[in-house]
Amino acid sequence: MSELVTFHGLHPAPALADCEEVDWRAPSLRVQRIRVLDHTCECLVVVYELCAAGGLFFVRRTDRSSATERVQESAWMVMREGHALWRGIVSGQAR
């Protein structure tokens, strides 16, 4: 008999005491299509997504801690900076 295995997505490390504070902003409506390249686990109260659109990258943050979801975005940036921000969030070096 096989054991039931539940797969979860990525869980970011807890934010470090000296972590970088991300300037979260209201979502931008600059493009019609956004590709989600990576995301954290849906079981979390705050979900992060690494997104790409129009040749730029950003991180979307969805906070589900209250009755109404709050969606915010980081600044839009070039690929190298977008991936660096994503690694910072996942490793606890940014929040």
Image (cartoon, grey):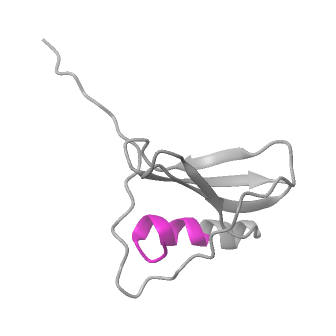
Q: Nearer the viewer, residue 79 or 57?
A: 57
Residue 59: where, in percent of width, then height?
A: 63, 60
Residue depicted at 35% across the width and 79% down the height: 16
Query: Is residue 86 magenta-colored?
Result: yes
Residue depicted at 42% across the width and 52% down the height: 65
Residue depicted at 39% across the width and 60% down the height: 12
Residue 32: where, in percent of width, then height?
A: 86, 43
Task: Note whether 29 is above or below 20 in the view shown.
Answer: above
Residues shaded magenta: 84-95
Question: Of all residues shown, which one is farthest toward the top?
Answer: 1
Question: Of all residues shown, which one is farthest toward the bottom?
Answer: 18
Residue 55: where, in percent of width, then height?
A: 84, 58
Residue 66: where, in percent of width, then height?
A: 44, 50
Within the image, what quadrant is residue 75 found in? bottom right
Kindly report the secondary structure that dominates the magenta region of the rendered protein: helix
Task: Note whether 69 is above or below 23 in the view shown.
Answer: above
Left or right relative to 32: residue 76 = left
Residue depicted at 66% across the width and 67% down the height: 74
